[in-house]
Image: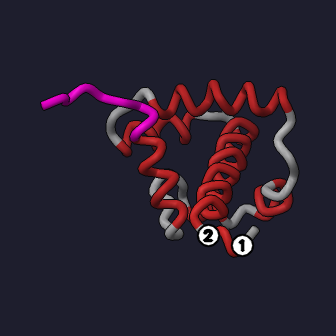
């Protein structure tokens, strides 16, 4: 039995949960933030993409969900909003991949 931790698998699981409307990483107040709603539809720039990748690495290296949440809580607002924006883009992409009729 392989019990090694795979960070990419934990993020895939969280993204899958997002496709069904469950976001355990985020507080409801963060999701309802009007500034995030405005930015959610903007394209992610190359600089933002590189920063988001680093943020994803910081979060995904922790095994437990509570530790992942703690990392998000410790981020400044800009980094957390960027992480959430990138996360929602990944969820959106997964939904579109699953539902070809939405293309």
In this figure, which residue is indicated by the disc labeled 2?
A: 99
Q: Is residue 71 left or right of residue 13?
A: right
Q: Are marks 1 and 2 in contact (CB under 8 Å)?
A: yes
Point out the image quarter for the C terminus.
Answer: bottom right
Q: Is residue 18 above or below residue 7?
A: below
Per the rendering, the mark at residue 102 is: 1
- The residues colored magenta run 1-9
Per the rendering, the mark at residue 63 is: none
Q: Seen from this angle, which residue lies furthest bottom?
A: 101
Residue drawn 33% across the image and 39% down it: 64
**Who is closer to the viewer here, 79 or 21?**
21
| Whole-percent x, y for residue 53 in the image | 65, 29
Q: Is residue 23 above or below residue 68?
A: below
Q: Is residue 68 above or below residue 87?
A: above
Is most of the magenta stretch helix, strand or loop? loop
Helix, strand or loop at label 1? It is helix
């Amino acid at each position: 039995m392989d019990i090694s931790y795979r960070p990419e698998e934990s993020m895939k699981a969280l993204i899958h949960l997002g496709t069904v409307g469950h976001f355990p990483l985020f507080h409801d107040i963060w999701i309802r933030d009007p500034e995030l709603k405005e930015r959610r539809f903007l394209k992610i720039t190359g600089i933002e993409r590189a920063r988001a990748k680093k943020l994803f690495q910081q979060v995904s290296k922790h095994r437990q969900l509570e530790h992942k949440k703690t990392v998000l809580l410790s981020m400044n607002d800009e980094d957390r909003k960027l992480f959430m924006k990138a996360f929602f883009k990944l969820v959106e992409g997964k939904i579109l991949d699953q539902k070809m009729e939405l293309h």
